[in-house]
Amino acid sequence: MEQFHLEIEGMSCRGCVAAVRAALSVVPGIRVDDVSIGKASVAIDPATASVAAVIDAVQDAGYDAREAA
């Protein structure tokens, strides 16, 4: 598993945190380590998941996401 960090825009409350956590939890091959307002940390199994899939899941939930620098 490889650790990956996201910056997420558009989150403003615990409901947003729950929505992002739920969106990430259904992506195969990742483990959600932490989600808080504006960021998330996940571990990715590169054999079954990709960074793009993680970002897509967050964007599908209605938030802007990108890899943290």
Image (cartoon, helix red, strand yellow):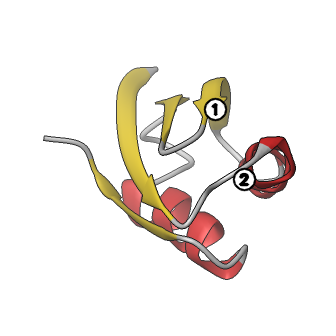
- Per the image, the residue denoted by label 1 is 35
Q: Position of residue 33 (x, y in %)?
A: 62, 19
Q: Residue at image x 36%, y 34%?
A: 5
Q: Residue furthest left?
A: 69
Q: Quadrant of residue 4?
A: top left
Disc nearer the start of the sequence (2/1): 2
Q: Quadrant of residue 31?
A: top right
Q: Residue at image x 39%, y 44%?
A: 6
Q: Residue at image x 61%, y 32%?
A: 36
Q: Are marks 2 and 1 in contact (CB under 8 Å)?
A: yes
Q: Position of residue 66 (x, y in %)?
A: 32, 60
- Per the image, the residue denoted by label 2 is 20
The reply, left or right, for residue 60 in relation to residue 52 is right
The reply, left or right, for residue 67 in relation to residue 64 is left
Above-or-below relation of 30 to 20:
above
Between the C-alphas of marks 2 and 1, the distance is 7 Å
Looking at the image, which is closer to me, 59 or 10? 10
Q: Secondary structure at mark 2?
A: helix
The reply, left or right, for residue 25 in relation to residue 8 is right
Above-or-below relation of 2 to 62:
above
Q: Residue furthest front?
A: 12
